[in-house]
Image (tube, rainbow, N blue to C red):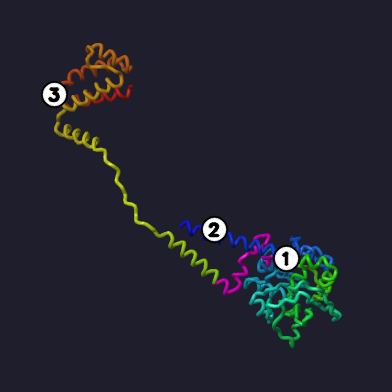
Amino acid sequence: MRTIKNILTIILILCCCVCKATARKYPFKKTDKGPFGTYVLYDQLPVLFPDATVKTNYSSPQSFMSKTIYGTNAYFVVALYAGFPDKSLDALKDFVDKGNVLFISAYFLDEELEKWLGIKMNYNFSKIDRNESIGVWNTDSLQYDYFNIGHGAITFLSYDSLKSDYSVSGRNDKGRVTCLTIKRGSGFVVIHCEPYMFSNYHLIKKGTKAYSEILFSSLPGPVSTIYWDEYTKSSGEMGDAEPLRFIFTQPALRNAFLWAVAGLLLVVFLSFKRKQKAIPLITPLVNTSLDMVRTISDLYFFSRKNEVIAKKKIAHFTEYLKNRYNIFTGLPADDYWNAVQLRSGMKEEDIKTLRRMVELYKGGEYTVTDTELITLNQLIDNFYSTI
């Protein structure tokens, strides 16, 4: 059992370490002022969109978009991975269909999101050109190129370039598409493959800052409200984003994770099985002296030998007086009972009655009735209780 507890402890520690490491390396959070945070971008949104109101959303799109949102709104997602549960994805679809803009800058997209947009991401990490640049078109169809730090190995692998629903908004110097605008319903979805271009590290440079200005200026339509998404971050501030959400959105990873948890629970359950023979129950030793006394007492009682019982009772009483009060039977009778009365503090009348019955029955010569035996027993018990 100790081994199982150690295994569980190690797994929990590893999960916490991985989640914390991921949150530090790829946060893209608006409050993070580190190299890969988005504090600068979020702070510059009122400048980039002077006529728009900026609001932050920590909850899932399903709960956030429960009410109908029409008009010229934009939902911004800048994260390492962009994936949404089925109902949240449906809420985003409805949001775009009503004429709004969904902007997503992420390296990885959920499979259902790719199916809805009709695109396929190209995840190629084998060769990364550290000197490649990334470009963007403005509204006048002029291209501006800016230096990239070398994360641009992710581009669009496939999309229908012949359809008017797709328009290219940016490429790298290899000619691969890095930004794509897609029309869905009355709105637009802008997919960007290089979220690091919006990190604090890039935006403090003048050239990259101009890159973001040109890209956002080319977004479709005027924007009245910007909803900044914190839900898709690797660790949500309000507890709505879950570190394991990426695993559960991928069928293969989800199944592997569930099988691993089931196997671990099975091992823990089987470990409860007894590993040694049951310890036999040892019966404590019986006090045979008490049994002997009880047996002899029953023998005397049922044989109606009241004289013997009275004699034994008186002998036990006189032995008690000897051990407790140092009153010996060799004393004269008057001195003996005066000492009993003085040392015990019992009433003189009760002492006289007890003395008469003790002197009468101690030899076992007189017949003792049941009533007399009960009276003798009560007097001795009263003596014990009085002292």
Q: Are marks 1 and 3 in contact (CB under 8 Å)?
A: no
* Amino acid, disc 3: Thr
Magenta-drawn stretch contains 245: yes
Of labels 1 and 3, earlier in sequence is 1
Magenta-drawn stretch contains 140: no
- Report the magenta residues as a range: 228-255
Of labels 2 and 1, earlier in sequence is 2
Q: Which residue is mark 2?
A: 9
Residue 72 image position (x, y, % from top left): 78, 72
What residue is rendered at 68% in x and 60% in y? 237
Q: On the image, which quarter does residue 286 sit in?
A: top left
Residue 2 image position (x, y, % from top left): 47, 56
251 vs 131, left or right, is left
Q: Which residue is mark 3?
A: 367
Q: Can you tell which mark lies on residue 28?
A: 1
Q: Are marks 3 and 2 in contact (CB under 8 Å)?
A: no
Q: CA distance from mark 1 to mark 3?
A: 107 Å
Q: CA distance from mark 3 to mark 2?
A: 82 Å
Regarding mark 3 in the picture, which secondary structure is present there? loop
> Which one is in front in this view, the residue at disc 2 or the one at disc 1?
2
Of labels 3 and 2, earlier in sequence is 2
Q: On the image, which quarter does residue 117 sit in?
A: bottom right
On the question of residue 102 being in view, the answer is no
- Along the line of sight, which residue is nearer the eye, 344 or 211? 211
Quarter of the image where the C terminus is located: top left
What residue is rendered at 25% in x and 14% in y? 336
Q: Is residue 23 above or below residue 353?
A: below
* Amino acid, disc 2: Thr
Q: Are marks 2 and 1 in contact (CB under 8 Å)?
A: no
150 vs 360, left or right, is right
